[in-house]
């Protein structure tokens, strides 16, 4: 009977399909699920002598320590603050670019723009850090120019107030191109007939944009925004780590949760604390994704992510 | 009327030309600096057009080739091996997930995509890889952690879902095993999807510095991007103690600034030469991925 079950075509299929999926299954198990078990580290005070399993249990002490310090406020504020600005400005500009790109008459220009706009996407943040350095470093193009104009030497890398603007600028620079092309692809998906019908009815360009393009692009905008909001407790490590060149003076405006956890792990070696902050990040991130999906679902069932 | 159309076009295109320049400019600036002489840099700072066209940075790097060629080799090995294995791994699970009649479809989907919502964090992962898997300072630590990326699996699954089920049906009626269907039918039919995630994966591996930052201390395993990071503050990483200078180089200051920029050009070069040609695959992949399949 069991032999018959094992031999039935359906079960054979299932086994074979499962084998095809097995490598990925194992890798995800090891590198995504096993670490989840490790969250207990956040509740311990790890020392090297006792190792992970015998170190003393301290309950929520690591969390209390983190939240009572100045660090917590600073790091969370930076992470959320930057992400909110990035999402708001980034989405607005990308949609604007996509709509305008759709209005460009020359097909050759559109192709040219599409290619060039993608360039920043292919550079890693380390390379971008070098580019930034070539502009505002001690010998930088802009720094030297300011000097030549007669002003005293201006050290960009210790001027804290500048950096929120700079980092936003760099983030927009790197992502505007390819995100606007994603939205542009979305606009391409809108059936031409709508525009033709509208123009027959005498609609102006801006009316068409307001009443056809934007509404039909909205689901994509919502999805993209939802995806970004889901990651609001996470940052692009490369941007915040390499571009400010790890200069401590800038930490109050450049330190985000991710760099904080990394530095705590690698530099101070406090496993319990860094694990606590990391767990905080994961849990908050999870709550945010579920909430934002729920809220969007309330507004418009179709636009939900899952 | 021609003027009525022209003005918005001029404005829009001006905006886009400006942004295009912004996209290319920084690259040009770095290239320019790499071709400058160090003395000129110290005296006058970087310029967009070097006053004295000077190849000494490149000579310097290529004359001490060991470090950079090794870094290049590591990046190349990791990228090609990683991409090949990763695509095969993803293809396997994507096909299984694309099959509507797969028994564990829903649980497996949840299993894979839940990890996009929640992860254990850096510390447990670091402990696992360093202390339990003992993968630190091996070439595999640069490859294996990225072998199964849920985002790419999602994209590939979308591509594979479009393959008509009748084709698969007729194959299994003819008695073909799933493996045969997979290798002989699905893979060839999924070439666009496979190409898309191959490109994303290649870019991911080539540009990666994260895994090296965490797990690599052995000099011989340093890939390009990580090496770039190390020489940011200390050019000494680029040179060995038995550093020699070619006799033809003038006795000026070490071309450290220009050498750094030259190295970043060498690191960015391959991508810039290759990827713009495949940009349409990236667009398709990013869009498909965003619109949940």
Image: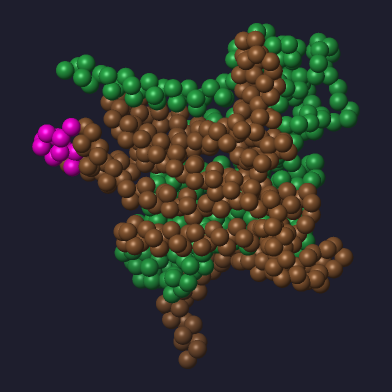
In this picture, is B122 found above or below A60?
A: above
* Quadrant where the C terminus of chain B is found in the figure: bottom left
Q: Percent x, y for residue A231? A: 52, 53
Q: Which residues are magenta?
A: A194-204
As drawn, the residue found furthest toward the top would be: B51
* Quadrant where the N terminus of chain B is found in the figure: top left
Which residue lies at the image location 81% right of the left edge and 69% below the top edge?
A55
Any idea which chain is the green one in this picture? Answer: B
Any idea which chain is the brown one in this picture? Answer: A
Task: Name the one closer to the observer, B71 or B174.
Answer: B71
- Count the marks: 0
Report whether residue B3 is seen: yes
Magenta segment's dominant SS is helix
Report whether residue B266 is seen: no
On whether residue A106 falls in the magenta region, the answer is: no
Which residue lies at the image location 45% right of the left edge and 26% below the top edge?
B19
As drawn, the residue found furthest toward the left would be: A201
Viewed as shown, does residue A303 lie left or right of A134?
left
């Amino acid at each position: 009977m069991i032999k018959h079950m094992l031999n039935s075509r359906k079960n054979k299929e299932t086994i074979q399909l499962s084998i095809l999926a097995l490598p990925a299954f194992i890798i995800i198990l090891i590198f995504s699920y096993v670490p989840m078990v490790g969250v207990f580290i956040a509740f311990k005070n790890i020392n090297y002598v006792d190792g992970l399993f015998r170190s003393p249990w301290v309950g929520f002490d690591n969390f209390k320590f983190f939240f009572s310090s100045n660090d917590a406020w600073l790091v969370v504020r930076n992470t959320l603050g930057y992400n909110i600005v990035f999402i708001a400005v980034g989405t607005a500009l990308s949609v604007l670019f996509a709509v305008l790109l759709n209005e460009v008459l020359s097909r050759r220009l559109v192709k040219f723009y599409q290619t060039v706009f993608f360039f920043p996407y292919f550079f890693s943040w380390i390379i971008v850090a070098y580019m930034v350095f070539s502009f505002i470093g001690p010998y930088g193009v802009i720094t030297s120019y300011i000097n030549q104009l007669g002003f005293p030497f201006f050290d960009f890398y210790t001027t804290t107030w500048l950096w929120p603007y700079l980092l936003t600028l760099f983030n927009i620079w790197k992502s505007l191109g390819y995100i606007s092309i994603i939205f542009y692809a979305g606009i391409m998906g809108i059936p031409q007939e709508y525009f033709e019908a509208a123009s027959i009815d005498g609609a102006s360009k801006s009316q068409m944009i307001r009443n056809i393009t934007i509404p039909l692009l909205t689901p994509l905008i919502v999805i993209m925004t939802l995806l970004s909001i889901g990651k609001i407790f996470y940052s692009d490590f490369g941007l915040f780590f390499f571009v400010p060149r790890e200069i401590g003076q800038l930490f109050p405006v450049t330190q985000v949760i991710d760099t904080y956890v990394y530095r705590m792990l690698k530099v101070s070696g406090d496993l319990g604390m860094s694990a606590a902050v990391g767990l905080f990040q994961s849990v908050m991130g999870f709550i945010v994704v579920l909430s934002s999906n729920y809220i969007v679902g309330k507004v418009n069932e179709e636009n939900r992510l899952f | 009327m021609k003027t009525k159309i022209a003005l918005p076009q001029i404005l829009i295109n001006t905006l886009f030309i400006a942004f295009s320049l912004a996209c290319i400019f920084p690259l040009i600036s770095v290239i320019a600096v790499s071709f400058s002489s160090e003395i000129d840099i110290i005296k006058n700072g970087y310029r967009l057009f070097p006053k004295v066209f000077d190849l000494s940075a490149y000579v310097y790097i290529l004359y001490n080739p060991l470090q950079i060629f090794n870094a290049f080799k590591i990046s190349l090995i990791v990228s090609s091996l990683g991409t090949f294995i990763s695509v095969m791994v993803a293809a396997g699970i994507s096909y299984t997930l694309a099959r509507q009649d797969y028994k564990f479809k829903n649980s497996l989907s949840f299993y894979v995509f839940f990890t996009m919502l929640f992860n254990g964090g850096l510390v447990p992962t670091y402990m696992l890889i360093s202390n339990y898997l003992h993968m630190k300072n091996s070439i595999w630590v640069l490859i294996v952690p990225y072998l199964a990326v849920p985002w790419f699996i999602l994209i590939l699954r979308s591509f594979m879902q479009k393959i008509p089920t009748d084709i698969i049906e007729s194959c299994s009626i003819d008695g073909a095993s799933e493996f045969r269907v997979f290798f002989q039918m699905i893979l060839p039919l999924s070439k666009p999807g496979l190409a898309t995630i191959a490109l994303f994966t290649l870019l991911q591996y080539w540009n990666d510095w994260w895994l090296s930052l965490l797990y690599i201390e052995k000099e011989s395993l340093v890939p390009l991007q990580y090496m770039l990071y190390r020489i940011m503050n200390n050019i000494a990483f680029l040179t060995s103690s038995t550093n020699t200078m070619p006799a033809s180089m003038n006795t000026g200051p070490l071309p450290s600034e220009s050498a750094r920029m030259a190295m970043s050009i060498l690191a960015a070069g391959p991508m810039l030469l290759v990827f713009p040609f495949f940009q349409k695959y990236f667009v398709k992949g990013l869009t498909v991925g965003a619109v949940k399949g």
